[in-house]
Image: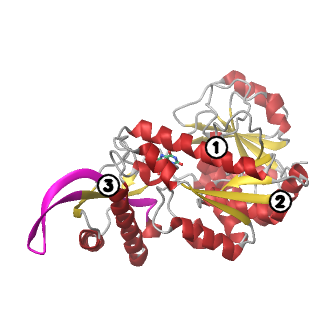
């Protein structure tokens, strides 16, 4: 039986900052959920909310019929109007006051309690069966691995797929961290050649993504089938779910799960175990810390599923991929050393398949280019470039052109999102 904390539902009437608001109220130990204004009362009441907060941007309002529908539930109701992007400390204080005074919330939402409840839920869902989990070394799947390990121990098998496009030392680091912290059955599948062979000569970004995605599913499905597990663990988190619900396009308001390993073959029928689907990203990190995962894993920059494949422009060759991997490691090392790693959301190297003329040791060179990208963002929908100190850019440049054979030039990407995207492909 799934445990339900005391819940306040935020009804989205077109409020851009609603996730941040939901998160800020949770910080006050009140559990919040977000639902679109089109949600049916039946669906809403399934969550047994103790109160409702209608949230709109100052620019949007209306939908009187929907407001009336929620009023008729008889639940305490509060209206908040936020101006997108503005500080809403006062409104949150008012919302928390509403939750405590009018909904009698006891401020009982605690992440340590969440862990105990999640462990109990996993045990009751899974019983004595086996669970297989694709472990990528990213925050979400790592935390799910740690939670599942605590809940069901030896019934868990983790599969780590090396797609040949990972960062320097990544397979070793992830395996070492998990071996050091958890006695778990972690299977390492080195499928580098399979991926790189399939990618040979392919330069179209979409085609590259599709090949990497499909190959991953094939490799993972093969490894998962060997475990005979009826359950598949997934690192779905709350924003994944929220982002898959259109504000007004889903009349039943049914919350759809976002399938991280979507597209698994039909004959592999798994039941999903998604223990962090109710948490925001930084709550997932906090849970990870409480479970003993090290900061080197929890505080890493986001890394895309197609890995270095979308940072190596054009057709991927093993030789040039190795240049990108070295350059990327230098960027990370220098950022960590200077303290800038944790001040940026993402900073990375991109390989450009363009040769330019240069000079090394008094000799003419004709080598490739690395672009350096550093951005900050709140939700990855828009992003600002980071003005890294020149001294840092200098030292990164000097190390890349000196240490990475085949690269003789480094350029800095000054494009925000939009019009650029964060990744180059
Ligand atoms: P873009 O390039 O779309 O990236 O501005 C936004 C954020 O998403 C990450 N990203 C991905 N993550 N699979 C992922 O898991 C992907 O295919 C993918 N593409 C981009 C990107 O690193 C950035 O944080």
Residue drawn at x 57%, y 46% is 216
Label 1 secondary element: loop
| Front residue (pair 289, 410) | 410
Mark closest to the chain's N terminus, 3 or 2: 2
Residue 93 visible at all: no
Residue drawn at x 24%, y 69% is 401
Q: Which residue is mark 1?
A: 261
Label 2 secondary element: helix
355 in the magenta segment: yes
In the image, is 369 to the left or to the right of 223? left
Q: Is mark 3 within 8 Å of ligand 1?
A: no
Dot in front, 2 or 1: 2
Label 3 secondary element: strand
Q: Which residue is mark 3?
A: 351
**Disc 3/disc 1 C-alpha distance (Å):** 28 Å
Q: Which residues are magenta?
A: 344-368
Residue 226 visible at all: yes
Mark closest to the chain's N terminus, 2 or 1: 2
Within-10-Å neighbours for mark 2: few <14, some 14–19, many 20+ = some
Q: Which mark is residue 319?
A: none
In the image, residue 369 sits, relative to residue 242, either above or below, namely: below
Within-10-Å neighbours for mark 3: few <14, some 14–19, many 20+ = many
Q: Position of residue 25 (x, y in %)?
A: 68, 54
Q: Are marks 3 and 1 in contact (CB under 8 Å)?
A: no
**Disc 2/disc 1 C-alpha distance (Å):** 20 Å
User: Residue 174 falls in which quadrant of the image?
Assistant: bottom right
Q: Position of residue 350 (x, y in %)?
A: 34, 55
User: Residue 137 falls in which quadrant of the image?
Assistant: bottom right
Q: Which residue is mark 2?
A: 155
65 in the magenta segment: no
Residue drawn at x 45%, y 50% is 196
| Front residue (pair 399, 220) | 220
């Amino acid at each position: 039986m799934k445990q339900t904390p005391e819940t306040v539902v935020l009804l989205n009437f077109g409020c851009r900052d609603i996730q941040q608001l939901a998160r800020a109220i949770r910080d006050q130990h009140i559990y919040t959920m977000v639902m679109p204004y089109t949600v049916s009362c039946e669906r809403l009441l399934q969550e047994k909310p103790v109160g409702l907060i209608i949230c709109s941007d100052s620019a949007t309002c209306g939908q009187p019929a929907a407001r009336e529908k929620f009023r008729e539930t008889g639940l305490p109701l509060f209206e908040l109007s936020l101006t997108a992007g503005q500080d809403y400390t006062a409104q949150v204080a008012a919302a928390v006051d509403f939750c405590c005074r009018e909904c009698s919330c006891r401020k009982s939402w605690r992440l340590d309690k969440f862990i105990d409840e999640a462990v109990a839920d996993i045990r009751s869902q899974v019983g004595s069966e086996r669970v297989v989990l694709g472990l990528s070394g990213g925050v979400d799947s790592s935390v799910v691995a740690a939670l599942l390990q605590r809940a069901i121990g030896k019934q868990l098998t983790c599969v780590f797929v090396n797609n040949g496009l990972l960062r320097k030392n990544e397979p070793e680091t992830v395996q070492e961290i998990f071996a050091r912290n958890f006695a778990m059955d972690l299977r390492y599948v080195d499928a580098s050649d399979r991926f790189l062979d399939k990618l040979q000569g392919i330069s179209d970004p979409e085609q590259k993504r599709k090949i990497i995605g499909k190959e991953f599913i094939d490799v993972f499905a093969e490894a998962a089938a060997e475990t005979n597990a009826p359950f598949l663990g997934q690192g779905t988190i709350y924003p994944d779910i929220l982002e898959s619900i259109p504000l007004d396009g889903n009349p039943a308001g049914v919350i759809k799960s976002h399938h991280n390993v979507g597209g698994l073959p039909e004959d592999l029928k798994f039941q999903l175990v998604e223990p962090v689907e109710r948490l925001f990203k930084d709550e997932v990190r906090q849970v990870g810390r409480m479970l003993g995962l090290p900061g080197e894993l929890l505080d890493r920059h986001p890394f895309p599923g197609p890995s270095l494949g979308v940072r190596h422009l054009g057709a991927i060759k093993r030789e040039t991929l190795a240049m990108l991997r070295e350059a990327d490691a230098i960027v990370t090392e220098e950022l960590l050393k200077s303290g800038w790693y944790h001040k940026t959301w993402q900073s990375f190297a991109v390989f450009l398949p363009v040769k330019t003329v240069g000079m090394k040791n008094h000799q003419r060179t004709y080598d490739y280019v690395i672009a350096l990208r550093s951005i900050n963002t709140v939700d990855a929908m828009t992003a600002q470039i980071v003005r890294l100190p020149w001294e840092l850019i200098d030292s990164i440049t000097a190390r890349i052109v000196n240490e990475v054979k085949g690269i003789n030039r480094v350029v800095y990407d000054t494009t925000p999102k939009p019009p650029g995207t964060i990744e180059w492909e």
